Image (cartoon, rainbow, N blue to C red):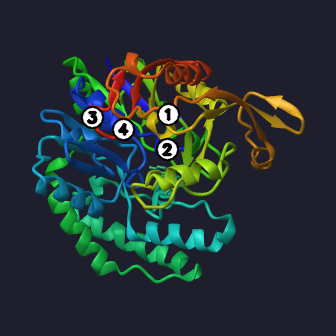
């Protein structure tokens, strides 16, 4: 059984935690897109781990983690993540493989990311400033450097020097400070020495694993509405965050994928700018007051809204959800009534699909259905049957509206706060 887990909303659906519990039944965990813009939080016992590039499967013994060709890697930040894990007793050598085909993120990508955002002013995307957009831009423009280049010092030096000099022209034009060639080379060459043993042909390795019938879990980063094709463009990230990205970003073909699990919060959140039709100040106050809904990568307060079933239903279409996992149910425990968006209204007309045009996104109004709240603490419940009837009705309601079977419910960040339906 090879499983793809993807976010059904705008990212931060709690995928890190669901991946962690699904890893128990997998041999290999694969990241196939995004970069260190992701922040996957996992709590094990009293310990909390926030992983940005390395699949959270690394927290389990005897699981191999693969960072596939579709990921963009900042090697300096990856080395920090490796060192952080090793310092906490996790073995990475032999358990972590990096695709030689994966593209690299450099300081000039981060500088350009930041300068473009500054220049856009109010129209900014609200990126994580990790250089993700410019790095994928270079990949598409065929001027990117890959991990394979990092392994060849002379070639790397030559290519990187040219790239820095060219990008410094753009950085200067945007009013920024030039990226130094020498310091960058030193930092990347040091990272290369540490990463060398991890770098391999992961496509061949994954196919050998398929032959041995190893079970794979594909860990999606970000969410469907941040997808470069299906998201709320241009307020999106620069990769395919949807199920198809698992194949193109790893080299494991679509017909070898057995199931797609959509991960969604029991409500909606988003960080950064862009449309969020069900945004609610009441919910933002409630969650922030509880100390939840702050970004794992940037610490930014997330925007909050009611569950948007128009969005998750569309996510079900483009990803082909077989199942859904609902997280953060406990966040809604105190409410007596809970709204769910079941359609949008655009210029007096009801629509069932998210629009494509930005002006239309801005003009839509959510049409709500109200569910009864349960007003009970669910965070200590450990069996699905023991959830209040109103909570189960709500969960079934949102899964039905999404069009997939509910199989997992999460009522807290820890492994044991997982209910199997
Ligand atoms: P970028 O990926 O840094 O270019 O940011 C583009 C958009 O995606 C911004 O709105 C970010 O806030 C959002 N984004 C990127 N990564 C994540 C994530 O892991 N979780 C939630 N939002 C993200």
Disc 4 is placed on an element classified as loop
Q: CA distance from mark 1 to mark 4?
A: 14 Å
Residue at left 42%, top 18%?
255
* Relative height, residue 51 to residue 57 (above, below): below
Q: CA distance from mark 1 to mark 2?
A: 9 Å
Which residue matches tag 1? 264
Separation of marks 4 and 2 at Cα, in angstroms: 17 Å
Ligand 1 within 8 Å of the CB at mark 2: yes
Mark 3 → mark 1, Cα distance in angstroms:
17 Å
Residue 11, numbered circle: 2
Q: What x and y, as percent, mark residue 139?
A: 46, 53
Q: Return the disc, 1 or 2, that comes first in the chain's sequence.
A: 2
Residue depth check, mark 1 versus mark 4: number of the one nearer the observer: 4
Q: CA distance from mark 3 to mark 4?
A: 8 Å
Which secondary structure, mark 3?
loop
Instruction: Say which element carries label 2.
Output: loop
Rendered image: mark on residue 415: 3
């Amino acid at each position: 059984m090879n499983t793809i887990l993807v976010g059904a909303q705008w990212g931060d659906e709690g995928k890190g935690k669901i991946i962690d519990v699904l890893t128990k039944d997998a041999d290999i965990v694969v990241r196939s897109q995004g970069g260190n813009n992701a922040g996957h939080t996992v709590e094990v016992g009293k310990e909390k781990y926030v992983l940005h590039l390395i699949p959270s499967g690394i927290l389990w013994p005897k699981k191999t983690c693969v960072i596939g060709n579709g990921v963009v890697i900042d090697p300096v930040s990856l080395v920090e993540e490796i060192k952080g894990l090793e310092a906490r007793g996790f073995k990475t050598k032999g358990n972590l493989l990096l695709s030689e085909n994966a593209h690299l993120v450099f300081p000039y990508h981060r500088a350009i990311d930041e300068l473009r955002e500054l220049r856009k002013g109010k129209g900014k995307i609200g990126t994580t400033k990790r250089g993700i957009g410019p790095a994928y831009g270079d990949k598409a423009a065929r001027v990117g450097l890959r991990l394979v280049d990092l392994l060849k010092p002379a070639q790397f030096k030559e290519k990187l020097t040219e790239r820095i000099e060219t990008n410094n022209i753009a950085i200067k034009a945007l009013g920024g400070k030039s990226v130094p060639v020498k310091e960058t080379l030193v930092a990347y060459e040091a990272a290369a020495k540490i990463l060398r043993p991890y770098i391999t042909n992961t496509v061949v390795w994954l196919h050998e694993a398929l032959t041995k019938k190893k079970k794979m879990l594909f860990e999606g980063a970000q969410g469907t509405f941040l997808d470069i094709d299906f998201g709320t463009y241009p307020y999106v990230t620069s990769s395919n965050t949807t199920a198809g990205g698992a194949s193109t970003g790893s080299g494991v073909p679509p017909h070898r994928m057995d199931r797609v699990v959509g991960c969604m919060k029991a409500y909606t959140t988003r960080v950064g700018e862009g449309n969020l039709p069900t945004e609610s100040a009441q919910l933002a106050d409630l969650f922030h007051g509880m100390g939840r809904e702050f970004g794992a990568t940037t610490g930014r307060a997330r925007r909050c809204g009611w569950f948007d079933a128009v969005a998750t239903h569309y996510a079900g279409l483009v990803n082909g959800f077989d199942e859904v996992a609902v997280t953060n149910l406990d966040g809604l425990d105190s409410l007596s009534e809970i709204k769910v968006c079941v359609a949008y209204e655009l210029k007096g007309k009801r629509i069932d699909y998210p629009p494509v045009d930005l002006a239309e996104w801005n003009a839509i109004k959510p049409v709500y259905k109200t569910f009864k709240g349960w007003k009970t603490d669910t965070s200590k419940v450990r069996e699905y049957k023991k959830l209040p009837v109103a909570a189960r009705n709500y969960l079934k309601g949102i899964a039905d509206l999404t069009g997939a079977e509910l199989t997992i419910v999460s009522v807290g960040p820890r492994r044991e706060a997982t209910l199997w339906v």
